[in-house]
Amino acid sequence: TGAGAGVVDLTTQPSTMASTQTQESQAQTQAQAQAPTQAPTQSQAQTRSRVVEVELVPGGCTRAVTDSNKEEYVRLRLQHGLKRVTGSAAAAAVRQGLNEVVPLNLLRVFTAPELACLLGGTADISVPEWRQNTQYAGGYTRESKQIGWLWRLVARFTPDERTLLLKFATGSSRMP
């Protein structure tokens, strides 16, 4: 089977069509909240969690993973992991918070890349727009010859180089 914490150990082939995951008990969560600065020892971590094997298909615990069905196993394993994440309390909280700002039914008209662009800005960096909206400090102005050199250089950058410069200067790789 796969390794603990719901992660498949890719160094060895899983033996059955089941997924192994670690579930933490409520007592462990409370104990960690009371002593956040103490790292649990290996034995403490082992006693605070339990391993649960989940069949990915009916009878999966007895069905061996072979070369002929390994693609099916990987597909099922990924589906299982995705269901665990999307069904989590954290995902529900994000959905609820986002729904308070924009009703989720309105978001369905956007593709994932369109929504990412709306939330994070455009990845296409317009040098003239960037130059027009830049504020200068340290005695430099829009007319300083060093600033002219900078913008001529930036105009020759590849899109990836512009993204790296913007990230360095602002902390964000996207234009607002």
Image (cartoon, rainbow, N blue to C red):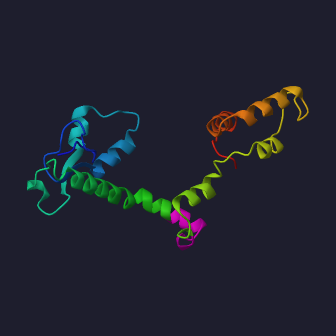
Q: Residue at x 24, y 43 (%)?
A: 4
x, y percent for residue 108: 52, 70
Q: Is residue 74 left or right of residue 141?
A: left
Query: Which residue of the protein is positioned furthest toward the left in this rendering?
Result: 62
Q: Residue at x 65, y 46 (%)?
A: 174
Magenta segment: does it hold 122? no
Q: Is residue 137 above or below residue 115?
A: above
> Residue 79, located in which quarter of the rendered image?
bottom left
Taking the spot 28% from the left edge, 55% from the top edge, the residue there is 75
- Residue 168 vs residue 151, the one in the foreground: 151
Q: Which residues are magenta?
A: 96-106
> Residue 102 in magenta?
yes
For this rendering, which residue is in front, 129 or 107? 129
Name the residue furthest right: 143
Mostly what secondary structure, the magenta segment?
A: helix
Q: Is residue 139 visible in this depiction of the protein?
A: no
